[in-house]
Image: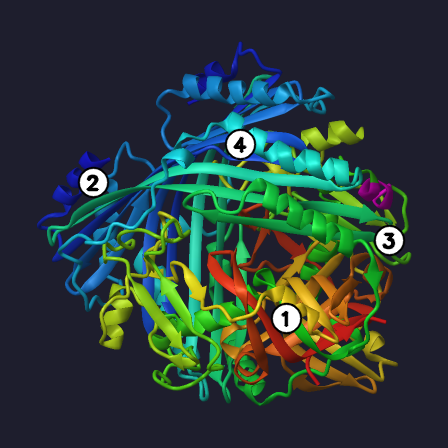
Amino acid sequence: MQNTVERTLTALKGRCDQAEVFAYESESTPVDFEDSSLKTITSRQSQGLAVRVVREGRIGFASTTDLRNPVRCVDMAVENAAFGDEAKFEFPRTAAAADPAINDAQTAALSAEELVDMGSVFVEALREEDEQFRSLAHLNSARERVTIANTNGLSAQYEATRFELYVGGQLVEGENILWLYEGYSLRKMGPSIEELTARVIDDLRIARHNVSVQSGTYPVLFSPGALIYLLMPVLACLDGKAVVRGLSPWKDRLGEEVLSPKLTLVDDGLMPYGPGTAPFDDEGTPAQRTVLVREGVIDAFLTDLNTAAALGTSSTGNAVREGIGSPPIPRPANPVLTPGSRESQDILSDIELGLYVKDLMGAWAGNPYSGEVSGNISLGYLVRKGKPVGRVKNAMLSLNVFEALKHQLLELSSDRDWSMQAFVPHALIDGVSVSVKT
Amino acid sequence: MRSLLKAAVQGQKADYVEVRVEESFVTSIEFRGPRLESVSQSVEFGGNVRALVRGGWGFVSFNSLDELEDRVKAAIKQAALIARTVDRPLRLAPVPTVEDTVRVKILRDPRQVPLSQKIDLMAGYNERILSHPGISSSQVRYFDRFTKLYYANSEGTYIEQERLDLAGSLAALAKGANTMERGSFSFGSSNDFGVAEGHEKEIDRICRLAVDLTRAPVVKGGEYTVICDPRLAGVFVHEAFGHLSEADHVYENENLRRIMKLGTVFGTKILNIYDSGLDVGARGYLVYDDEGVRTEKTYLIKEGRLVGRLHSRETAARMGERPTGNARALDYRFKPICRMRNTCIEPGDATLEDMLAGVREGIYAANFYGGETNGEMFTFTAGEAYMIRNGRIEELVRNATLTGNVFQTLKNIDMIGRDFTRFDSAGGCGKAGQAPLPTSEWSPHIRIQNVVIGGRG
């Protein structure tokens, strides 16, 4: 691939002011269990190449997954540059100095058979727990290689591993459907299959009993899996691009307190084996640890090269390509919320009457810049005298994140977990509106 | 390609082998605020092999046709690994063997429209949005994708298909006190660049909407009679019922099979729902699905009763039913699974006036922002919503998110409009990590009793 990248870069010389070639290769072996049995073993080999040029001060982008003719990209990128966005930046000249842990030999060596065995542990345990539960599991080990080179002299490459483990399933009783999920995607194995199995079984035991709840406002303990839906609008507003575009309501509030002083949000691009960890981002900028919100005060916005140039700062190393055909945009690498001091179990046991919400459905659907979050409580428990007593159904939870995380946040837990790409604690929020169908 | 693919799938030690190769050319344009944020063109080339041994599937995807024979062997090896754990061997439901070439009949071909002209059209829309009083930002997106698909299976089917998919969305954003509100409109087609043109009036409307939303109160949570406009009704039928009709959710699940037993009453006599691949021009238009099965118009609900579901060859065989041509893959990286095409509520005989009459307090909900379902419960957010008071559509309200139990809610549809509306949006459907798949949802107005609307206060 290095040769293809160099060849493409050579073809670009003389046709533009600056150019960059990015290439991605990966091999993965996802194993999928569905309906309590092994369903598919996949082998996925993918490769692709993307070209960005700056020509007469404008950016052109093109990509291909047809490596028989990568140079075709050059013509397309040059054509697009006639219309492209203004480039106020220069591609980086030097490679990253940091060498974060991203390559795990054990993960790289995992065979399909070993993944099948691991998945079977979950499926068998759930079969034993409840014959009616239809379990599913997704296990994957992947190797990826990123190569980047530009006309400013940068030529860099890294290899990384990825381990994905998702387990869950469905219980149908009458017209009552329960879905449960646990899992993560990291650069090496995190919580074991046994641990995730135990969590699913715990939920299954509580959640099969439905309890009724009245519409009203409640203190709600959000699990990491539910808290992520409250964090999404926060991250959207901290996206430098949303600031440049004038979409973020925080665009003029750098240095101001916008959230509770209990909240410190860091994007740690160098966290060992974090899902988004790499020595450099998808533009070749060295990865770093960026404090976004320090005790409620906005400290920085996430940027890539062009966004940083527009804001008059330097890139935070957060350029991410969401696919080979997508130009880089700012995205958090590993968003991390600093923990509180008490275990989530202790926080829960102090709730006299409230809810423990573990998953929300449709909560991502609103306009993130309004801060309004509304979701159906797809997995949540009524808590009485410090104990979850059963599952709450047909209930809709609504809050405004900017208000809830500023004025209603009571406490964060000391224990944290991965939720999507983020590493977050539980959060207890007071006065959350819940509408229930009677 | 024909001889290469046909040779690759023949004479293998497997019950079934198929190979798919696709080549796409994609153009996309995006404005954010005054900036033309990205223009990109890409070539996507790739393929996959899927093999069945007893009941086990192996699947290999790749970006290079080199070593195709080895990839077929690898897929068979994986399938055999699963086959050892399978207690019930699987036969695919029989379908006719086909040799066919499908060309798209295009009204205005986006490939003949120069890139600069597409950009100018979108730039014009963008400027119109940004020049509207009270609008602080915009988002204008357009893409077109022309695909050539080559498909062969070990039963002797060989199909070459062309597919066109194009869509765009226009959004106006207005800044309120601590919020950003949005009005949006989108279009889509599988055969005509013409749908991208002439949206000036819609733009003026969405700009006014965004500005008005900044001053609108948040909807009061509670239970309401809701009238959905055709666009939201379309999303409703897709989310609340379409996904439940996908047979792969049902076939190995005894309990869900009981709920989804053909003949079960799901709605009142006025409710008719179908899913069709035959609507030329719809983004869900499809001649053959990704297992080489000819598509059709499949009734799901007739006069309130469940009469059908969306099948792949595997699910049809498992359930002893007929394949319906609903096995679709987002692209060569994925295996085909049961997906919708154009999912429609058939028109009824009510007018909007009929529906409004007698509603003392309700919600008129139009357009959509997003939606999700877990089989039993659904939730979706309207793009705009108004209070209905004493039979009249009154003030605009913000953040109307509808939620409910699928089964109850379908039964609560008490009126269906006569104004069946054909339209396509830029939205795509997501399932099992495969998104956005082009689908369509055509519908008339519908009225639903007792819908929970989330909201504070």
Alpha-carbon span between mark 1 and mark 4: 36 Å
Mark 4 element type: helix
Q: Decide: few, some or many residues near mark 4? Use Cα within 10 Å; few <14, some 14-19, many ≥20.
A: many
Disc 3 and disc 1 on one polypeptide chain: no
On the question of residue B39 being in view, the answer is yes
**Chain holding disc 4:** A
Disc 2 and disc 4 on one polypeptide chain: yes
Q: Decide: few, some or many residues near mark 3? Use Cα within 10 Å; few <14, some 14-19, many ≥20.
A: many
Report the mark closest to the observer, 3 or 2: 2
**Chain holding disc 2:** A
Quarter of the image with the N terminus of chain A in it = top left
**Horizontal and vertical percent position of residue A278:** 31, 51
Report the mark closest to the observer, 1 or 4: 1
**Horizontal and vertical percent position of residue B104:** 51, 41
**Horizontal and vertical percent position of residue A133:** 76, 42
**Horizontal and vertical percent position of residue A129:** 76, 40
**Chain holding disc 1:** A
Which of the labelled discs sits on residue B266, or is there none?
A: 3
Residue A203 vs residue B243, the one in the foreground = A203
Marks 4,3: beta carbons within 8 A: no
Q: Is residue B315 above or below residue B213?
A: above
Marks 3,2: beta carbons within 8 A: no
**Chain holding disc 3:** B
Q: Earlier in the sequence, mark 2 or mark 4?
A: 2
Residue pointed to by mark 1: A347
Alpha-carbon span between mark 4 and mark 3: 41 Å
Which residues are drawn in magenta? Answer: B255-261
Alpha-carbon span between mark 3 and mark 2: 57 Å
Which residue is at 46% across, 41% downward?
A163
